[in-house]
Amino acid sequence: MSRAALRIMLTLILISISLYTLQLYNRPKLLHSQDSAFGALLVFEENGERCMNFESMHDLGRQSCIRLANPKQLVFAYTRMMMSALYLNPHPKSILIIGLGGATLANALADIVPNAIIDSVEIEPAVANVAEQYFYYQPGPRQRLFIDDGRRYVEQAKQQGLQYDMVMLDAFDVDYIPVHLMSVEFLQQVKSILSPDGILIANTFTDSTLYQQESATYAHVFGQFFNVELDNRVIIAVNGTLPNLSTLVHNATALAPQLTPIGINLEESLSLFTLSNVPNDDVPLLRDLTAPR
């Protein structure tokens, strides 16, 4: 064999070894598996990220992810979109999050709004356990955790006369948002625990078959709201009057030093805000008795 042919062969071997090594590096590494009501809850690392998901490490619809090199930076666009609700109220004193996941929102809010009380409601104890063990969530006097169904918690909060400046809905089952957390009746209950000018933020899908019905349902309860859309749609509604654009810009500018390090770009995030269209009267509302099962 000539020297040239030998060099080519060695080069090909090195390339093969490098590709194999890269493939091994990119393969998800399972850290934890735990039974839950929604199937096996998995925690794994891949491409410098630690993620939580049900059943599969290869599903793109992951529940939560953090970057190992910078855990405070928000990985998912929808979490950045939900955090931009602070443009409406930069200083909420009380926040309710329904759907803990990996506590991405709860941890980010604890850093940016240090004087707020943040109550998180999670129906699945396994998720809460994983959030504490693997995603830096630390319940305490300011970060209060309740293992409960989100709707039941809201009903009890209403009975107790509790009020929140901000309520975030980020609860999903295997398929989509649980139907009892989408109805007119539920949103009316949420509105009843919002302080005057309190804000409701809901994570939904842009490609949901219920898109128009969700719009009509939120409009029925809150009137016009903000759509913040990219891959997901985040609905931002107010128990009062929506602020104007100049207010959003003013608040966003003031928050930029805190939000930029976690991956929120001021101009980009503001550009995603649009006013909802008034839905047609013939669009059926989502109600407790008619919500699709």
Image (cartoon, rainbow, N blue to C red):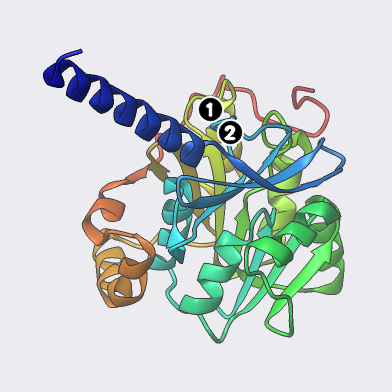
- Badge 1, how many Cα within 10 Å: few under 14, some, many 20+? some
177 to the left or right of 157: left
Which amino acid type is marked by label 2?
A: Glu
Which amino acid type is marked by label 1?
A: Tyr
1 to the left or right of 187: left
**Which residue does the image show at 63% across and 61% down from the upper left?**
103
In this orientation, which residue lies closer to the viewer: 91 or 222?
91
* Cα separation between marks 2 and 1: 5 Å
**Which residue does the image show at 33% across and 60% down from the upper left?**
264
In this orientation, which residue lies closer to the viewer: 71 or 270?
71
Q: Image quadrant of residue 30?
A: top right
One can see residue 225 in this view: no
Q: Image quadrant of residue 285?
A: top right
Label number found at residue 214 = 2
Q: Are marks 2 and 1 in contact (CB under 8 Å)?
A: yes
Residue at far front of view = 1
- Badge 2, how many Cα within 10 Å: few under 14, some, many 20+? many
Q: Which residue is mark 1?
A: 211
Label number found at residue 79 = none
Q: Secondary structure at mark 1?
A: helix
In this orientation, which residue lies closer to the viewer: 43 or 230?
43
**Above or below: residue 77 compared with residue 182:** below
* Residue 243, position as x, y percentages in the image: 37, 63
* Quadrant placement of the N terminus: top left
**Above or below: residue 219 compared with residue 149:** above
* Residue 24, position as x, y percentages in the image: 50, 36
One can see residue 235 in this view: yes
**Which residue does the image show at 39% across and 65% down from the upper left?**
262
* Quadrant placement of the C terminus: top right
